[in-house]
Amino acid sequence: MNADLKILGKSEVKIPSIGMGTWGIGGWAAPDTSRDNEAIEAMQRGIQLGMWLIDTAEIYGRGYSEELVGKAIRDFARDQVFIVSKVDTNHLKYDDLIQACQRSLYRLRTEYIDLYLVHSPNYRIPLKETMNGMEELVKREMVRFIGVSNFPLNLMKEAQSYLNITNIQANQVKYNLKCRYDETDLLPYCQKEGITLMAYTPLEEGSLALNQILKDVGKEYGKTAAQMALNWLICQENVVTIPKAINSKHLDENAEAMGWRMAKQDFEKLSAAFA
């Protein structure tokens, strides 16, 4: 399946409008090896379905999620996948950040991370020091692009102000039909300035997949409620999303939310229904 592509931030690189999240794959607060084969097969299937952006983080499963991603991508050429990882909020001092990235590279079995994000703000560490470290990773070619996660608009602007040779390409935040607080300022700014908003928890922990309003509108398209919720996100300029799925049915369902767009009146109808 051909991917439904969008430009990443101000770069010229294209990424899938729907990728794969891995929070909980490989464990939560500690490693969990009980579903390794299933997880690896799921990621490999997702890549084949066009969802070749995989989002992970050093904190997921205490690094084990990154190890599973590394195993999943080993059968693909490196440029066939786009890897996103995130540095933990406790590793945002300059030297700690460099070392954290080195550990992530080792676990991922790769020479570079495509997009590296600050997982969340740490108000005890100067943001300038953190962003200097992020920029150093770009200089060393350990990462291709950088960004932030869970940053409000004012802090994202401050982070950008400390950069000299690169830009913040993405901000990963919780965004879905039920969770809309970033529409007031962050999303319009990202759209105006060419920054990708990467929406996590797009199905609001599964509740949107069961929603009757989405089911009813979806009937007109031959699509499920989950597909309508995902498509509502990617209908918007500069927005991509990273639903998590580990079984093949859900992977297929997520992939089939790409390659089309709902009509403007249905987008507006859903926006109003969940406002």
Image (spheres, grey):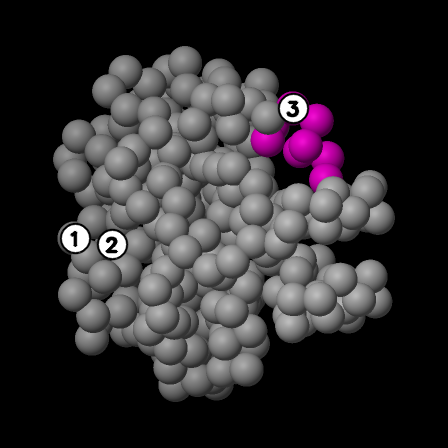
Image coordinates for residue 168, horizontal then vertical, percent: 39, 28
What is the distance, in whole Å, between disc 3 and disc 2 at their CAs?
A: 34 Å
Q: Mark 2 points at which residue?
A: 105
What is the distance, in whole Å, between disc 2 and disc 1 at their CAs?
A: 6 Å
Of the numbered discs 2 and 1, the one sitting upstream in the chain is 2
Q: Name the residue under label 1.
A: 111
Judge from the rendering whether residue 262 lies leftward or rightward of residue 171; answer left or right.
right
**Disc 1 residue type?**
Glu
At 44% from the left edge and 31% from the top edge, which residue is drawn? 195
Of the numbered discs 3 and 1, the one sitting upstream in the chain is 1
> Mark 1 and mark 2 in contact (Cβ < 8 Å)?
yes
**Disc 3 residue type?**
Asp
Look at the image and tell me in which quarter the N terminus lies: bottom left
Span of residues in magenta: 177-187
Residue 185's mark?
3
Q: Is residue 47 above or below residue 229?
A: below
Q: Is mark 1 on a helix, strand or loop?
A: loop
Image coordinates for residue 142, horizontal then vertical, percent: 20, 43
The answer to whether residue 178 is magenta is: yes
Can residue 164 be seen by looking at this rendering? yes
Label 3, residues with CA under 10 Å away: few <14, some 14-19, many ≥20? few
Label 2, residues with CA under 10 Å away: few <14, some 14-19, many ≥20? many
At 58% from the left edge and 18% from the top edge, which residue is drawn? 154
Of the numbered discs 3 and 2, the one sitting upstream in the chain is 2
Q: What element carries label 2?
A: helix
